[in-house]
Structures are given as structure tokens and as C-alpha cells.
Amino acid sequence: MKNKNLSIKQKQEIIRKKAREILEKHNEGIRYMDLVRKVKEECPGIDLRRIKWEVWYLPRISQDVIKPERGLLILKKYYEEISKGETEVKEKRIYRIDESVFYQHFADYLVNELEECTKAISLGGSRFQDKWGTPDVLGIYKISETEPIRPLPEIISAEIKIDINQLITAFGQACAYKLFSHKVYLVVPKDASPVDLSRLESLCLRFSIGLITFDRNNSQNPDFRIITRAIKSEPDYFYVNEYLRRLDKRDLKELFG
């Protein structure tokens, strides 16, 4: 029987069955439009509007399909495994790249592509000697002295995380940097779980933190991609001065000289 001659109920059954088959193959979930496109490929004779409607409606009529984040569909069994931490994204390889190799790449990205900084340096380690952590990259945005109006320099901090199982920790560190930074960026692997990335994006928007993804497999060309820009907020200047005093003279000269 041709698809165009099917009844509405038959079309519904076909679409829902195909959608579930596709969801079974995506244990990290799949975006709404990606699922629609895949169902359309499997059912070329069914009207696209009908497919869009059935896919959108699927979490509302099925107990085994949920939408934990905007635009993301996943089988309930997979989401429960992810939530409990029982299923982690499988690594395609053993990572031997040290996280620090990305620091200077991102410092250059802040200056040359995002143009959020006039100068930025690789920091990391325990340079601040503080349990609240040290930014992996620290930058300054300073207006040229030739300009008629010159506001105070802005401090930009970044936390870069290569381990996709440490994203919550990374977000907490990024939040801590807002004490002494006008803008903060969180930089995470692009192959992290879509569920985690979607949740991070929502959190970053609420806390005015910038979110950027990168290719952790490529230390030469990390391919930084901006998801959300950081929004400026006033830091606590007590902590600004406290942490800047902990930098050595060479770093201070590089940033402010």
C-alpha cells in the first residue's frame, strides 16, 4: 500500500514506530528537527507537516519518550541511566592530550576572533593558591589611551575542561571566577552529551556566563564555537585586587603593559 493512500491512523503508527526505532539508536538523545528529517527519509511518501506534528506530540502520548530539554527527545530508559551517572559517553580513544595545550589557543581566540580581550594569557595550575581555583585563561580588555573616554579595564576569565565527566565541576569554577571578573567563559568538549550541553547552555544564560565548545581531539586546531556570549557584570573589587596581587610581575606587565 502506498503511503499517500494510508489513513491518518496508519500514518501515525508508521511515524511513531520509525521515530522509536531511531531513538533506540541514539542513547544520548536527538534534536527534534534531526529526528523529523530521519523519519522523513524513512517515510518519503508521508507529508512533512504530519511527521513534524507526530514527532512533536510523541513525548505527550508516550510514557517511554521524554523531552528533558528544549528541542531534545530521548527514550526514558536512556535518560534515567544518564541522570544516575550509570552511563557515560564512551570515549572513542584514550586521551593523552594535556588540557593545558588548549589554554594559549583559547587566549588567542579571545583576542583575535571574539575580540573580548586586548591581551590574554595562559594561566591555569594553582597560580592563585586558592581553593576557589585559578582560571585557565585570564584576559584584559583595555581601551587605547588615544581614545577620549577610557573606562576601567575589564577582566575576562575562562575555565577550559577536557573531561566530559567534570562539566558540573567546571561550571562551579566558572561561577567562582565572577567574583573577580567582568566576564567569564566556560569552554567544554563539543562531543559532550547533548543533554549536558543543553543544560549547561541554560545555566550559562541564567548566570551570564559565556559557553563555547571545542574539539578536544585536535590540539592544533580546537575549532572553538561560541554558543552563548558572556554578559558583563561588575565584580567585587576587593577580590579583583586580591587576586591580581597574586600574579607575578611578568604576568601583570603582559596584561597591563
Image (cartoon, rainbow, N blue to C red):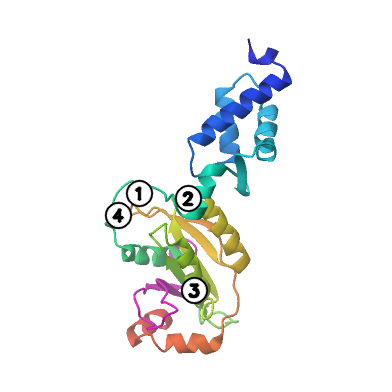
Dot placed on the residue nearer the N-terminal end, 4 or 3: 4
Asked whether residue 117 appears in the rendered view, the answer is no
Amino acid type, residue under disc 4 in the picture: Tyr
Q: Is residue 64 magenta?
A: no
The residue labelled by disc 3 is 156
- From the image, which quarter does the N terminus lie in? top right
The residue labelled by disc 2 is 193
Magenta residues (range): 111-140
3D distance between C-alphas at marks 4 and 3: 28 Å
Amino acid type, residue under disc 3 in the picture: Ile
3D distance between C-alphas at marks 3 and 2: 27 Å
Amino acid type, residue under disc 2 in the picture: Ser
List x then y, in percent, for residue 142: 50, 78
- What label does residue 95 carry, if any? 4
Dot placed on the residue nearer the N-terminal end, 2 or 1: 1
Check disc 3 and report its element: helix, strand or loop. Answer: strand
Say whether marks 2 and 4 touch (CB < 8 Å): no
Dot placed on the residue nearer the N-terminal end, 3 or 2: 3
User: What crowding class fits label 3: few (fewer than 14 Cα within 10 Å), some (14-19), or many (20 or more)?
Assistant: many
- From the image, which quarter does the C terminus lie in? bottom left
Between 192 and 140, the one lying in front of the other is 192
Check disc 4 and report its element: helix, strand or loop. Answer: loop
Asked whether residue 173 appears in the rendered view, the answer is yes
- What label does residue 35 carry, if any? none
- What label does residue 91 carry, if any? 1
Residue at the spot x=56%, y=32% of the render? 20
List x then y, in percent, for residue 187: 45, 62
Between disc 4 and disc 3, the foreground one is 4
User: What crowding class fits label 4: few (fewer than 14 Cα within 10 Å), some (14-19), or many (20 or more)?
Assistant: few
Say whether marks 1 and 4 touch (CB < 8 Å): yes
Q: Is residue 185 above or below residue 153?
A: above
